[in-house]
């Protein structure tokens, strides 16, 4: 080849290679929330969550302390055939005083049905759709949300997804002791969180603990009540729920998890009750990842992993979703630090739009268990098609457009033979005191 021709070819290759590389986006500014006057009884920060079989918890806040905690609802707009009374709470955090926080459980509800509802007899009408009772069912997933321009982009993209339930593996508002930011976060997510159930677990930014002065998770537990009582848990920091043919366990990375802890005992009891014929898919969600090849937060999940990974492996968990690291990563099926056909897939997705920016640096070489990793903001979608197959896709925020950059078909462990091989081990673990 002539020297000039070689130069041209090399130039073309370099241009193509550079253009094909993904350019990581810079952080965006925190959103501004202008003051909008509302009546004191006007329901604000409305969000919903699953509350046991065929029931939904409606949560909202009013500044009027005398507002009532009832919800009127029905299957036709402005025509409410049902009414449910709930409970309320509030909290103080030094000079901050929360509004009246209402929690009302409604139901029983029909599956895969649109309901219209009004909170406390005042304000606008909202509507939500209940999840289906059978496959397919779709989960939207994003963690470490915050309140930045990238958060807004992620929320807009999730809104375009035809999902049934949203799962958030910790770090919601990034209030970090500034309690007013819990209010603005509730305002930001209300359009989505009032129309589909949001199932969340805590992250490090929810702790807000001040030793000797303030216990941890006061704001989180007061505002985001999850179905812990309905699932036999003694703490709002860990619980489980079922939708269609899926059993989902939400664990707490920031509460005790050693083998003598209440959380560990509850997890064993919850796993022992899972019926894989009725719920062939088993998912687990928590904040701090166990399998992470990013340089950020290395080793922080090791203790929890050492204690609980054998339980999840014995139970045949299909996938584990975590946040905390501000980047995306997907593993092979893995257990005990290496690929294992009978282990769960681990997904790290702590990049919903937080103000701290992305975690750009990865360990090299890439571990053999790591399949795909990318420092970008975005969300994931898990469509469980039937009892044996699901489709996972990762959608990064690329110039405000959702671009699918990773995808994979997942086969449930139910039909793999893994559970049959470990049946004796499973019985031994769950029979232990």
Image: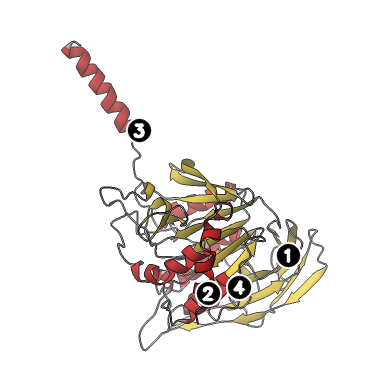
Q: Residues within 10 Å of mark 4 (few under 14, many from 20)?
A: many
Q: Position of residue 138 (x, y in %)?
A: 61, 52
Tell me: residue 246, above or below residue 367.
below
Marks 1 and 4: CB-CB under 8 Å?
no
Q: Secondary structure at mark 4?
A: loop
Q: Residue at x 53, y 77 (%)?
A: 431
Distance Cα–Cα, label 2 vs label 3? 50 Å
Q: Residue at x 58, y 52 (%)?
A: 415
4 or 2: tag closer to the N-terminus: 4
Q: Position of residue 102 (x, y in %)?
A: 63, 76
Residue toward you, 158 or 393: 393
Q: Position of residue 185 (x, y in %)?
A: 50, 64
Residue for badge 2: 430
Q: Residue at x 69, y 73 (%)?
A: 105
Residue for badge 3: 20
Q: Residues within 10 Å of mark 1 (few under 14, many from 20)?
A: many
Q: Secondary structure at mark 2?
A: helix
Nearer the observer: mark 3 or 1; the answer is 3
Residue 225 in sight: no
- Which residue is situated farthest in the top direction here? 2
Residue toward you, 352 or 337: 337
Residue for badge 4: 227
């Amino acid at each position: 080849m002539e020297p000039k021709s070689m130069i041209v070819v090399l130039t073309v290759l370099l241009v193509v290679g550079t253009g094909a590389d993904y350019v990581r986006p810079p952080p965006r500014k925190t959103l501004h929330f202008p003051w909008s006057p509302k009546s004191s009884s006007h329901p604000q920060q409305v969000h919903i969550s699953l509350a046991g079989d065929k029931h939904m918890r409606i949560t909202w806040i009013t500044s009027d302390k005398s507002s009532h905690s009832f919800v009127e609802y029905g299957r036709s707009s402005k025509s409410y055939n049902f009414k449910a009374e709930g409970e309320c709470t509030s909290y103080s955090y030094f000079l901050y005083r929360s509004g009246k926080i209402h929690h009302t459980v409604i139901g029983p509800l029909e599956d895969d049905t649109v309901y219209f509802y009004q909170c406390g007899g005042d304000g606008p009408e909202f509507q939500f759709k209940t999840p289906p009772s059978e496959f397919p069912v779709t989960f939207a997933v994003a963690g470490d949300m915050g309140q930045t321009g990238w958060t807004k982009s992620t929320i807009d993209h999730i809104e375009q997804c035809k999902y049934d339930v949203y799962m958030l593996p910790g770090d919601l508002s990034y209030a970090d002791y500034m309690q007013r930011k819990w209010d603005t976060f509730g305002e930001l997510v209300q359009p989505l969180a009032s129309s589909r159930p949001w199932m969340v677990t805590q992250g490090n930014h929810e702790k807000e603990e001040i030793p000797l002065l303030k216990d941890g998770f006061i704001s989180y537990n007061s505002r985001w009540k999850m179905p812990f009582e309905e699932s036999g848990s003694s703490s709002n920091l860990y619980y489980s729920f079922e939708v269609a043919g899926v059993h989902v366990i939400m664990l707490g990375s920031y509460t005790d998890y050693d083998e003598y802890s209440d959380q560990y005992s509850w997890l064993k009891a919850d796993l022992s009750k899972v019926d894989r014929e009725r719920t062939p898919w088993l998912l687990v969600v928590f904040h701090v990842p166990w399998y992470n090849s990013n340089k950020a937060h290395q080793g922080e999940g090791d203790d929890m992993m050492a204690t609980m990974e054998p339980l999840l492996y014995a139970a045949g968990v299909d996938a584990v979703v975590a946040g905390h690291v501000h980047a995306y990563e997907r593993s092979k099926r893995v257990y005990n630090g290496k690929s294992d056909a009978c282990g769960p897939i681990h997904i790290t997705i702590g990049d919903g739009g937080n103000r701290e920016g992305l975690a750009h640096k990865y360990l090299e070489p890439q571990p053999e268990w790591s399949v795909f990793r990318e420092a970008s903001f975005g969300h994931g979608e898990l469509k469980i098609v039937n009892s044996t197959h699901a489709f996972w896709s990762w959608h990064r925020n690329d110039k405000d457009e959702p671009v699918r950059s990773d995808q994979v078909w997942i086969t449930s462990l139910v039909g793999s033979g893994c559970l049959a091989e470990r049946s004796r081990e499973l019985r031994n673990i769950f029979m232990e005191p």
